[in-house]
Image (cartoon, coloured by chain):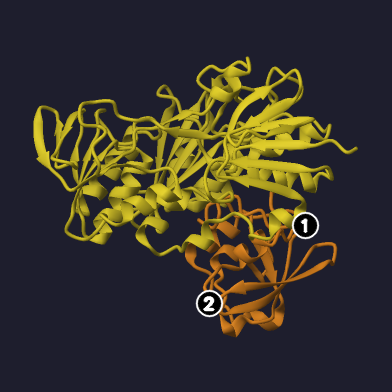
Chain colours: A yellow, B orange
Amino acid sequence: MPESVVIIGAGQAGAQAVQSLRAEGFDGPITMVGDEAYPPYQRPPLSKAYLLGTFERPRLFLKADSYYAETGCELLLGTSAKAIHRAERTVELSDGRKLAYDKLLLTTGARVRKLKCPGADLPGIHYLKTIADVDGLQEAFQPGKRIAIVGGGYIGLEVAAVGAKRGLDVTVFEAMDRLMARAVSPQLSSFYAAEHEKAGVKLKLRTGVEAFEGNGKVERIIAGGQRYDTDIVLVGIGVVPCDELATHAGLASEDGIVVDQNARTGDPHIWAAGDCTRHVGREGHSLRLECVQNAIDQAKHAALAMVGKHKTYSEVPWFWSDQYDLKLQIAGLARPSDRLVLRGDPASRKFAVFHLRDGAVAAVEAVNAAPEYLMGKKWVGEGKKIAPQMLADTSVPMKQMA
Amino acid sequence: MPKYKVTYIEDGGKAHTVEVAEGWSLMEGAVKHLVPGIDADCGGACSCATCQVYVAPEWQAKLPPRSEMEETMLDFAPDVRPNSRLSCQLRMSAELDGIVLMLPKTQHA
């Protein structure tokens, strides 16, 4: 009997694992369990082109419908896993079935963090994580409507950009003193704040949400002691890892299922990959990454390990965000103590901020600047040292600095 | 939506002919049908330069020119040739029915 693999979670990491397992020659049965109604799909377009309506639903799916059957992967959709029985190596499903596994991969992802303030349960308050979420938002997301966006992070700002483009009246409420504070440097925050204001988006920084009011549906948001009338609310205040299945089975989780550099948990038969995990990154710090890159790369490493090929996970994290006609591309993980070097003029809407640590490139944030991003990503991987004045000199093309 | 044929040829010579819907990218055609050799990690956002293809000479003239973004991304892809394109930036149309694309040995430099 060939060994069997069960994958819990039908997202980007799960789909990658199926593909990588087959590419690595694994020919046993694979079963993938997903609690949504859909086979694995790309989430990044949801808050961008899919919400705008320029990217049709069939294009979201990562594989052709026939792929899973063709590759011998049974998909159990609309089904969730209730428990892992490690001693007998089975997974108990919501439909009462038990699946036996030789190797188990958890790609359970993350769920949106919910607001808990008064009125937070009112209809008309939306979150954005799934196709169903966007479809639910779509009906109300119409020109002339007022939308209050809670959270000035990637999701909130991408929705703000789409809303402004669609002709909605957009206000963003952010508790911190700058936009995308967790993800980008202050320079980028200021640049994006100006761009959003230019597009007509109202920004309320240092303004935490206190409550919502409304008769049968949300009509007002109370934030920073003031009341604002609104038609729709979209909350984007981050995610929490879906680790309950793992913790209930006695696997370690510290705000993320703890895995090693081969994506393995403390159980030799169980791996985990993607947003649900916590691992020690290439710089030696424990971290939880919420991004496509980690989903893909960690799933690849898990698949390798499952077929007995071990490769240390040390890829450079990368991220992107599309807002208006601005493509933000980030590689590496910045720290507040990094020395920042600006290359290019933000006024030209094409520039990059390099983060130097001990003289070496530790991260790069690039706006409409692909060469800076791609070269920067390579340098982060190499720990390349480079003189700040050279980096800042736009008369020297990136390629010549190699 | 009408569909048209695309043939992808792996570096080792193995050919895959698949049907791609009008308006979809030639990257999507490969990825969804599991043609090996196109990674497209970013899903078509022109963010990763891992969907490079070489366009068969007779088809080159039928394609729109490279955008500045595509041009600069290609600068950093491995083994770039004059007929290199990022397949996420190429849209399927009747005019491209039958197009032949060769795949590089690797997408990661």
Q: Residue at x 66, y 47 (%)?
A: A75
x and y percentages locating residue A358 in the rendered image? 52, 23
In the picture as drawn, the residue positioned furthest to the left comes out as: A226
**Which residue is identified by label 2?**
B1
Is A357 rendered above or below residue A145? above
**Which residue is identified by label 1?**
B105
Q: Nearer the viewer, residue A310 or B106?
A: A310
Q: Is residue B61 visible?
A: no
x and y percentages locating residue B100 in the rendered image? 71, 76
Q: Earlier in the sequence, mark 2 or mark 1?
A: 2
x and y percentages locating residue B3 in the rendered image? 60, 77
Residue type marked 1: Lys
Q: Chain of mark 1?
A: B
Please tell me how many numbered marks the rendered image carries. Answer: 2
Is A118 rendered above or below residue A319? above
CB-based contact (under 8 Å), mark 2 and mark 1 = no
Label 2: state its secondary structure: loop
In the picture as drawn, the residue positioned furthest to the front comes out as: A96
Q: Nearer the viewer, mark 2 or mark 1?
A: 2
